[in-house]
Every structure is written in structure tokens, then in C-alpha cells.
């Protein structure tokens, strides 16, 4: 009677138990890369990966490399973390399961909100240094002008200057009522996101 040796050694994970992804990342973005070895072999060599666990249906895995991707973009406001089990199996059907928590990083998705009015008045022949409008906006309920950058567009934008950090608008040349009695500009408030 000959006794044959049976491989009873399960794969060993070297990859971590947590990962993160930025909210709204495209669905092909790599979320996690499972890495395991079996019997001292090369990384991923002879291993087949699969998924299980609470949120496995939200992810895809490349069976021979262990690369995990989301099936749809993550939305922090809907779900800020996922729990998956990454399963590594070898040719002898030995398996090891690694629980992985995938955290979704929140992204600022709100635009600045203006608190300043929509009209301004300037006296004819006023000095070009005269402030004719002061744009004021907040971002995510913060302080006025903090983290905001201002710019101009619109029909008459080329006749004005704006201080990007404060929203102060001045004329580039004195206003002449007889030449032009009104101007149309758009003030744009942008945040860092």
C-alpha cells in the first residue's frame, strides 16, 4: 500500500484587509488587488480567486489575478463602505477566505452658493478702482469666499476685472452712460473640487 501525499496547505494571503475608493470613480477602477501564494509559489500562481460576503454582488473579480472592481460607481451618500470576502482556491481545492472592507471616500459634489445680489450700480465717470460689485459665495456652508475662486464671463466681461480670491469687481475704464448705459456679466464661483 502506497500512501500519496495530498496538498493540504491552503493559500496564504499577503494583501491587506482594507481598501478604499473615491466616490464616483468609474466602474473599471481597481478597488483591491488580492495577492496570495500557495506552498511558497509565486504570487497568484496556481490560485483562482472568487468573491463572497455581504456585498459581493456589487463587485467583479478577475479570477486569475485577484483584481477587484466595482460593477457601478460608488456613491458615498448611499453606501460609504462595503464588506466582501475574497476567496483564494488552489488546484487541490484548498481555500482561504479574507474579509475585506472597502471604504468609499466622500467627494464634494456641491457647488458654491451666492449670497450677493444680482445687480450693481456705478456712477458715470467713477474711478476705475471703484468697487462696483462684490461677489460673495459660500461652499458647503463655510465662510464667505473661503475656498472660492471667482471669474467672469458674459457679454461685457472684457470691460471688467475681478479679484479671484475676493470677488471684487471693478471697471477697466470709466463708465460712460452715453456710450453704454448697462452691462451684462456673469460671475462664476468655483470651489476646489
Image (cartoon, rainbow, N blue to C red):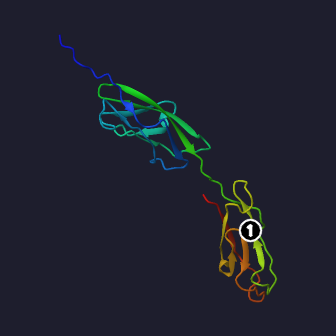
Which residue lies under the disc numbered 1?
Answer: 135
Q: Nearer the viewer, residue 174 or 35?
A: 35
- Outermost residue on the top side: it is 1
86 sits to left or right of 82: left
Q: Is residue 134 above or below residue 87?
A: below
Point out the image quarter for the C terminus. bottom right
59 sits to left or right of 173: left
Under circle 1, the secondary element is loop
Q: Quadrant of residue 82?
A: top right
- Outermost residue on the bottom side: it is 178
The residue sitting at 56% across, 48% down in the picture is 23
The residue sitting at 65% across, 74% down in the picture is 154
Q: Quadrant of residue 112?
A: bottom right
Q: Is residue 52 above or below residue 167?
A: above
The residue sitting at 74% across, 83% down in the picture is 128
45 sits to left or right of 184: left
Q: Position of residue 61 (x, y in %)?
A: 41, 39
- Outermost residue on the left side: it is 1
Q: Is residue 99 above or below residue 74?
A: above
Q: Residues within 10 Å of mark 1 (few under 14, many from 20)?
A: many
Point out the image quarter for the N terminus. top left
Q: How many marks?
A: 1
Q: Position of residue 2 (x, y in %)?
A: 18, 13
Q: Position of residue 114 (x, y in %)?
A: 73, 62
Q: Quadrant of residue 98?
A: top left
151 sits to left or right of 71: right
Q: Position of residue 69 (x, y in %)?
A: 45, 43
Amino acid at each position: 500500500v502506497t500512501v500519496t501525499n495530498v496538498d493540504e496547505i491552503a493559500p496564504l494571503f499577503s494583501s491587506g484587509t482594507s481598501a478604499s475608493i473615491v466616490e464616483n470613480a468609474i466602474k473599471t477602477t481597481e478597488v483591491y488587488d488580492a495577492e496570495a501564494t500557495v506552498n511558497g509559489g509565486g504570487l497568484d500562481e496556481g490560485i483562482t480567486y472568487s468573491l463572497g460576503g455581504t456585498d459581493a454582488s456589487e463587485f467583479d473579480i478577475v479570477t486569475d489575478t485577484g483584481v477587484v472592481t466595482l460593477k457601478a460607481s460608488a456613491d458615498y451618500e448611499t453606501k460609504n463602505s462595503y464588506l466582501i470576502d475574497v476567496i483564494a482556491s488552489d488546484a487541490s481545492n484548498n481555500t482561504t477566505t479574507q474579509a475585506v472592507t472597502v471604504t468609499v471616500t466622500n467627494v464634494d459634489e456641491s457647488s458654491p452658493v451666492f449670497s450677493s445680489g444680482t445687480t450693481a450700480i456705478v456712477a458715470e465717470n467713477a474711478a476705475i478702482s471703484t468697487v462696483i460689485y462684490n461677489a460673495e459665495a459660500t461652499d458647503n456652508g463655510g465662510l464667505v469666499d473661503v475656498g472660492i475662486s471667482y471669474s467672469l464671463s458674459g457679454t461685457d466681461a472684457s470691460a471688467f476685472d475681478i479679484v479671484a480670491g475676493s470677488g471684487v469687481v471693478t471697471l477697466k475704464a470709466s463708465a460712460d452712460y452715453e456710450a453704454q448705459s448697462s452691462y451684462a456679466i456673469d460671475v462664476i464661483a468655483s470651489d476646489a473640487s
